Amino acid sequence: MKSDRTPESPVEFHESLSDALGVELLVKRDDLLPFPLAGNKVRKIEAELASLIRLPEVVITNGGIDSNHCRTLAFMGARRGFRVHLVLHGLQGSASAALSLLHSLGARYEIVEPHDIAPTIERLSAQYSHAGIAPHVIPGGAHTPAGAIAYRDTSSQTVAEAHPDVVIFASGTGATHGGIAAGAASVEPDPRVIGVSVARSADRGFPAVREAACWAGLPPDRELEFRDEFRDGGYGLASDATLSAVSLGWSHGLPLDPTYTGKAFAALFALTRSGEIAPGSRVLFWHTGGLWNAIAPIFTAMYGRTQSQ
Ligand SMILES: *Cc1c(COP(=O)(O)O)cnc(C)c1O
């Protein structure tokens, strides 16, 4: 199993975007972690699987139909030979592409209403156990201690080597943020760490980040910065500012998506413009991946055409 482990992603200095933003910009390229281009989910799920005594026979988890978490797990199950059973919700525009990918990876799935997620997971777990197949349930988004600890370990190493003044990234269910914050806090002098919410308002999102930071060993009296003013009204919605940030990135050869990294980059853009991040600061933009979210519409267009021919 060791030889199957994911290699570490690089940190790159980005000269032309440094000039555009007026800071010294480093990018941690978790988008370059292997297919399915899901970035941080690859790191979190790898860590979760590695924390188990042996690979499970079947993994059950839940997420949106277009979820990077579910896609990544389906991919790993196909690669490593365990079954994946997904409890999905929320039919969206790119659903046919997302579902056809899950199908081709051999994952099974149920599509349910949000209130049926927990009962469906329970029912499937009972069915598998009854059939003598031990299920392992992973919480949605891979919000687990192992994921937070994996991010802490990479963060302390990355921050010690890159010594940024500021670290900024997209924050969702909390393990990435909690882990990066705990890792950064272990380095002297520790940088300012800014998690940019892509979905939840602070009152809902902050407790999950705090929980993950505790898992990763951050003392409870240490501050966490979870900014919810760049979330554009919620998950999957994108403002003009976010879309401009996405085009700015692509026009300088940094691929970004409108669901996750575009919001974090829009925040970085706004904070450098307002002076809240001082000119000349050394900024580490932690690219959390998610490029499928930028590419899926193209894939859907192709797939839709094939269907209708
Ligand atoms: C899930 C995801 C995030 C958020 O990670 P959390 O650990 O849930 O906070 C950020 N970026 C991308 C690309 C993601 O898929």
Image (cartoon, rainbow, N blue to C red):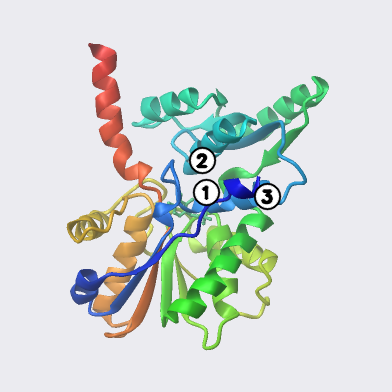
> Gap between marks 2 and 3, in whole Å?
15 Å
* Residue 135 in the image, given as x and y percentages of width and height: 74, 32
Q: Earlier in the sequence, mark 3 or mark 1?
A: 1
Dot placed on the residue nearer the N-terminal end, 2 or 3: 3
Q: CA distance from mark 2 to mark 1?
A: 6 Å
Do the CB atoms of the residues marked 2 and 1 lie less than 8 Å apart? Answer: yes
77 versus 252 height, above or below: above
Picture disc at residue 91: none
Question: Does residue 141 show up?
Answer: yes
Indicate which label's residue lies in the foreground, 2 or 3.
Answer: 3
Label 3 element class: helix
**Residue pointed to by mark 1:** 42
Across and down, in percent, residue 141 comes to 56, 47
Residue extending furthest top? 309
Q: Which mark is residue 50?
A: 3
Task: Name the amino acid, label 2.
Answer: Thr
Q: Is residue 63 visible?
A: no
Q: CA distance from mark 3 to mark 1?
A: 12 Å
Percent coordinates x, y for residue 102 in the rendering: 48, 28
Q: Crowding at label 1, few (<14), some or many (≥20) Cα neighbours within 10 Å?
A: many
**Amino acid type shown at disc 3:** Ala
Q: Which residue is mark 2?
A: 72
